[in-house]
Every structure is written in structure tokens, then in C-alpha cells.
Amino acid sequence: MQLRVVLSTLAMSIVVVAVLGLVLQTQIADRLVQGKEQAALIQADISRQALERDLARIDPDRDGAQAVLDDVLDRLSTSGQGADHDGLARGTDPTSDAGAFDAVLIAGSDTVGAGAPGALPTVPGGVTVEVSAGPAEVIPPQLRAPVLQGFLATKYLTVASSDQAAPVPTLVVGQPVRTAGRNLQLYLLFPLSAEQRTLALVQSTLALAAGVLLVLLAGISSVVTRQVVRPVRQAADVAERFADGHLDERMPVHGDDEVARLAESYNEMAASIQSQIRQLEEFGALQRRFTSDVSHELRTPLTTVRMAAEVLHAQVDPAEVTSARSAQLLVDELDRFETLLADLLEISRLDAGMAELGLEEVDVGAIVRRSAETVRHLVEATGTPLLLDLGDQVLAEVDPRRVERILRNLLANAIDHGEGRPIEVRLAADEGAFAVVVRDHGVGLKPGEAGLVFNRFWRADPSRQRRSGGTGLGLAISLEDARLHGGWLQAWGEVDQGAVFRLTLPLRHGERLRTSPLPLLPVAAAPAAAEPGIRDAAPTAGTALPPPEADTGDGDTTNGGADMPEAALPEPTLPGPTLPEPTLPEPTLPEPTLPDPAPPSGPGTSSVIR
């Protein structure tokens, strides 16, 4: 900024100085020329009067006129260079301002209309006769014509001088001089050498002054800009450190100018933001502590209620339909309640940064199959085909419990919203990462909902019946689990076209993800009708996903531009509490109208709703 201001100031200063210099030079040159003209006219008038006195009795047409003219002109030139015959020295009167001059006397024709203007007299035989004194050859005919007609005339010429190498600009003043006979032509030549030297001195002085002025302006603008920019730089540095988390950073306040008021306003704003951030941190910590405490406190009465519910459920007579149904509903809701408590505890641990990974090198395909087995009861209840395309063996360093929980949530979510249509699960890997894609062909997602499905307790359709008894926290926990691994969990969907969820994790913990082995945006149609149940995808059936090499990772339309990395959370180091895995007895009532009982659940189990 400082350099930019100095350069712009110099550019504008150069323009101003150039314009000012041209104006000054023009004014000085005009004044010099005007002064020279006025002095020359005065000198010409004095010279004319002197010549008319000396030539009052001289007839230029008589013999011996040439010698007279030379003598008179010699006296006139001597007076112009030193003093005249009346004793007037140069510099003692106004006429001396004209400076040195040369004189020319020409005894030409004074008959107006006798020929062309400036025509010379002739004698019989056609020989031109002209009596003159001085360098008459330098006087142009355009100047002699008005003088012959009796007028005063001036003209600027470039006259070559014997004592100077280059021609000299010269002011020529011509006027008639009366004699005893006809009029003579008097021309005074005033060289402008002194004016040229004066103008050159003025130009060099202006150039030097302009250079010095520009240097001074550059220094002044640099100093002034630095005084203004330095507080701005300090404010930017303080703001950057404040944004990095150093909330105690403040700007120094000096004086009471505008910069000081800016620093005071910034410090007040920073103090207000710091206070609000601390209040939010305290509130968040209080909220997490409250959630954790409530979840822990509820486990004791929940255990008591569960024991009572199991006793009631065991003593209910199957013949009493109403009692049996009520006992079954009580057990199912207790299962869901316990799952919700486990999810709340897990969320509180994740928010507090107390979750840690139990890393193992495992076969990811085996984890996918175990996850599919945990939702088998939902697959059989809904008659949903679950097609597994696991490909070659993929070994990765992950926490198998958390990865299995992510996949279980994704599969349960796909079954809930798949409308009984085939669900495809595909596994692929490249040199640095592996990806698992779960796609359903159900109701899909409306525009903008792909970014909301991971919000806590968010549902796309609250009135929709849930088969898995989800708590609304499954996808939120799955997203945090993916971030804990340094991976991505992304979603895509269109109305009536189904939804796609893609889990991408590095093969080695700590490696940075750059692209995903599988695209997020499907490019093929739904697979052909398949038999309900969990089965491997037939080679001829294919899937709705393109091969791995179709994804270039450059954000094109093949993958919908969804390969942008999620912000990964740092690996926590504090150990988190572990909850015992509850064991529930399977319900035994064969009532066909009752909902299927939920599977045993614990801290690693989470169902999903939208």
C-alpha cells in the first residue's frame, strides 16, 4: 500500500510539475519576446530620428550617396553597440534594453504601384540599380513591401552569423526614413541570442527544481503514508492473531486522533467478542456436562424400569392381546430410550473431545458384511434387496467399532427410505484411501437437504414411519466418527431418485485425503429387480455406480464436484468412558400386528432418521 501511494503521488506530481513548467516557460518566453519587441521598436524610432537628421540634406539619387549611407550607417551601428553621437550610453536609458543590433539602409523605389511590391529601380538597358548599406540580402521581400508603402513592419528571421556556428533567431524591424530626395528603408536586426540563453537557463532551472521537488514529494509522501499505514498494519497483525485464537490481543492506543479512536473501537469490539466467546464456551461446556450428567443419571431409573418391564413382559398371558401388546410396546420404547441415552453420551464425549480411536488393521469388507448382518432383521421385514459389491480385499488402519457403527447407520437409513427397492453397497480403494458407497432408490432428498441430513434430530418428513426406531443422532455421530478418522462423509440425493452416502477414509491413519476412490454422483440407472435379502451383487447385474477410474478427483460432473475434503477434527487424546453393552431378551409374542422388536443396542448402536 505504501509503495502504491508513493507511486501514485509521484505520477500525479510529475503531471502537475510538467504542466506548471510548461506554463512558466511559456510565460517567461512571452515576456522576453514582448520586452524585446518593445525595446526594439523604441530603438528603431530613435534610430529613424537620428537618420532623418543626418540625411535631411542628402539626395540618395546623386552621386556619392553610397559613401554617405555607409558613413551614416556606421555611426548608427556604433551608437547601437556603445553610445550614440548625442552621448547616450547603453544601459543609461530605456533604449539600451534592445541590446546590440545591426542596421541596413536600402535606397529602393518608393513609388507605390510602379511594379511589384519591393521592386528595385532600373536604368535603360534593364540593369537593376540599388544603393544600400549593410547586409541587405537577409531582408526578405515580404518585409520590404510594407516598408516601401510607408508602414512600420516587424518579422522574426533565422539569420546565419559569421561569429556563431548555428543560425540565430533575429527580430527585424523595418520602417521608412525621409531624406531630401525620396525615402530610404531602414532595417534594424536584433539578435535573440541573449533571450535564447535566458530561456535555456530558465529551462534548466525549472528541470532541476522539478527533479528536486519530485524527490522531496516522494520522501514526504513516503513518510506520511508510513505514518498512516503503520497503524493499519498493526491492526491487521492484531486481527490475525485474534482470529488465530489469541483473544487477549489488543491494539496500542496513542494520542486522540482518528487512529487512536480506531484502536479504541477495535479493542472494545475485541473485548466484547472475547466475552461472548467465553460465555458461549462456558455455556457449551455446561450444556455438555448437563447432557452427560442427565444421561448418566437416567441410566439407573432406566435399568429399574427395564427390569420391571421384563418381569411384566414375562408374566403377560399371550392370550390377553391388549396386555401383551402394551408390554411389547413398553419393551420396544425402553430399547429406543436406552439407545437414545447411549447416543447422547457418545455425542457429549465427541463434543468434549474425549473420544479416542482404537486403531486396528482390519479387513474393511468384513466390517461391511458385519454391518449388513446387524440390519438383516430390517432387510427381511421390508423385503429389501441388499446388494454387496466388495471387490478385492481392502486392509485399512481404522477403529472397527466406529466404522461398523457408521455403516450400520447408513444401511438402516437406506432401508427406512428405500421403499423396498434394491440398496447397493460398494467398496473400493486406491493407493491412499478406501470408500464405501451406500445407495438407495427411494424417496431421495430435496434440494438443499444433502447438507442437513447430518444435523442432530433433523428429519426430512416427520410424519414418515420409522422402521429402525432411530433417535435422530445416528448420522451426526457417523459424521463425527468419520472426521475423527480424518475422513469424509458426504450425501447426495434427488427426489424419487434415491440418495447416496459416501464414506471415505484413509488407509493409514494420519494421511491426508485428496480424492475418493468412488464418485458420489451416480451415472447409471437402478439395477434390475433383485431377490430380497443380503446377497453379493451378480457380475451381470452391475451397480448404479461407475467404475473407480471414472472419478478423477478434479471436481467434475462425474462425481458432482463432491470431492472437497471435510474439515478433519484433531485426534483426541483423553480417554472416554465406556458403557456396558446392554443385553435384552428377544420378545416372544407372535402378534403379527405389532412392530418388529428393535435389536439389542448399546453405545455403538445408532439408528437414523431424516
Image (spheres, rainbow, N blue to C red):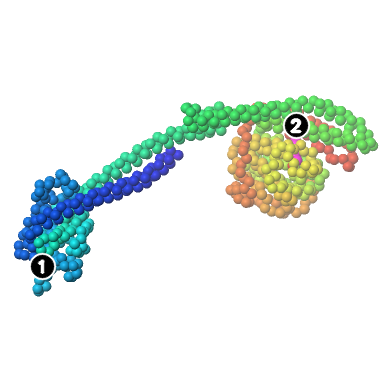
Which is closer to the viewer, label 2 or label 1? 1
Residue 337 in view of the camera? yes
Circle 1 residue: 129
Picture coordinates of residue 99 (x, y %)?
A: 17, 49
Residue at 47% in and 32% down: 231
Q: Is residue 216 above or below residue 306?
A: below
> For the residue carrying disc 2, how many other residues have a C-alpha within 10 Å: few (<14), some (14-19), or many (20+)?
many
Going by the image, does 403 lie left or right of 532? left
Residue at 7% in and 62% down: 65
Counting labels gives 2
Q: Is residue 608 magenta?
A: yes
In the image shown, does 409 or 546 lie closer to the viewer? Answer: 409
Quadrant of the drawing holding the C terminus: top right
Quadrant of the drawing holding the N terminus: top left
Earlier in the chain: of badge 2 and badge 1, it is: 1
Residue at 59% in and 43% down: 514
Residue at 75% in and 49% down: 442
Give the extent of the magenta segment: 605-609
In the image shown, does 375 or 335 lie closer to the viewer? Answer: 335
Name the disc covering residue 342, or none: 2
Residue 390 in view of the camera? no
Q: CA distance from mark 2 to mark 1?
A: 134 Å
Going by the image, does 52 lie left or right of 169? left
* Residue type, label 2: Ala
Q: Is residue 2 magenta?
A: no
Q: Secondary structure at mark 2?
A: helix
Q: Main secondary structure of the magenta part?
A: loop
Picture coordinates of residue 69 (x, y %)?
A: 8, 59
